[in-house]
Image: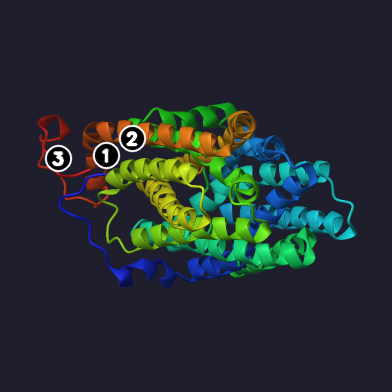
Amino acid sequence: MAQAGPPRLNFAQAFRALKHRNYRLFFTGQAISLIGTWVTRIATGWLVYRLTGSSFMLGLVSFLSMAPTFMVTPLGGIVADRLSRHRVLLITQAVLMVSSLGLAYFALRGTITVTHVIVLGMMQGLCNAFDIPARQAFVVEMVEGRDDLSSAIALNSTIFNSARLIGPSIAGVLIALFGEGLCFLIDGVSFIAVIAALAAMRVTPRPPRAQGKHVLHELREGLGAAFGFEPIRAILLLMALMSLVGMPYAVLMPVFADQVFHGAAMTLGALMAAAGVGALLGALSLAMRESVLGLGRVVAGGGMLFGAALIVFGLSKTLWVSLPVLVVLGYAMMVQMAASNTIVQTIVDDDKRGRVMGFFAMAFMGTMPVGSLVGGELARRIGAPATVMLGGSLCILGGALFGRMLPRLRTIVRPIYAARGILPPLPEGVGSAAGLVPQDSD
């Protein structure tokens, strides 16, 4: 979180993680698979809204599909620390492929119902509870250390948001021409790319961990590492707030497309793609940073900008005004989330990485179900625009509070950065208590 002077951007540095063979394979496989994932996300939201015409049902389906992620992710973090993360990912990606093909089967037969969407969505949510901590923790193994970690995390965000840009555009056309079933089928087939990439990797087995610890003991260890350490706790709490009150805007997008902008599937695709453009720009800007220093300020500023963009989006009644606002919104969301991820991955101990990243995923994705459910009900009562603006106001407040905490947080983090060679070590006997942290840093 500490930085002496302004951050430096270097385009050549953005892709340095690709020098690692395993990461190149993962990058390529994910780039293909994530397009399919975003096609399915758009198709699922449109399908539920077409079948029910209810913003509350949009929130309820999202809640039920992501609730298993919230409840089970801490256990997924333990599994990621105990077992081969590479093997866990092979299994989870195969299960996710089966669930998408299940949606395709029912949709193409014309028999799909909201119940099918909920059951298969819950299956995906349960699988993600194990996939996300393993995938986040596996990044360090693929790049073989911390030097290229920030590049890898930012590139992960880049391909995610490139897919977020491409996927909705494809989904809008496919839904309009062929219906949702083909979208689900494309997603299921796209998982073959990432499974093949994982199978082609040459992975060095991790040193065996000491056995015999009870699951509850390991859970308490992970909980202590995540919430007993103030910098990580502050980041996780801000992430949880942003996810709870800010991210429901995405669930409500079909309502905006239909009721506010009087459009259809193509309008929904354009709205989601605009946010994807901004998120892609945000990911690339982080990838070009030469150092993790200064990311604390990015976390605080990104949170406040995200909230401000939500408010403006809620006020807008014109599509051509809303689209550039969503670009800013996507940018702010991505820099806040990716910067938070990078800080946590940089300061966490390797033997607790899976569990801490499990709580990170729980803070971001796990609180989404509650936010989606509450957001759907609020939208039914006060309207989608007012719901989004309320969430934006709370995001601004959260980002501002985190910004006020930065001076104290950087005095805690600086010794860790010094020990890991990110900052020069402080003279012996001189530490944060002496106030030797640059005043213009975060």
* Vertical order, 260 against 180 (above or below): above
Between 373 and 297, the one lying in front of the other is 373
* Disc 3 from disc 2: Cα separation: 16 Å
Structural distance between the alpha carbons of marks 3 and 1? 10 Å
| Residue 354 circle label | none
| Disc 2 element | helix
Q: Secondary structure at mark 3?
A: loop
Residue closest to the eye, 423 or 168? 168
Residues at discs 2 and 1 in contact (Cβ within 8 Å): yes
Q: Earlier in the sequence, mark 3 or mark 2?
A: 2
Q: Name the N-terminal-most of marks 3 and 1.
A: 1
Q: Secondary structure at mark 1?
A: helix
Mark 3–mark 2 CB contact (< 8 Å): no
Do we see residue 348 in this rendering? no
Which residue in the structure is indicated by mark 3? 437
- For the N terminus, the image quarter is top left
On the image, the x and y values in percent for residue 288 come to 32, 64
Q: Quadrant of the C terminus?
A: top left
The residue that disc 1 covers is: 413
- What's the amino acid at mark 1? Val
Q: Quickly name the residue at label 2.
A: 231
Report crowding for label 3: few under 14, some 14 to 19, many 20 or more residues within 10 A (C-alpha): many
Where 196 falls versus 348 (above or below)?
A: below
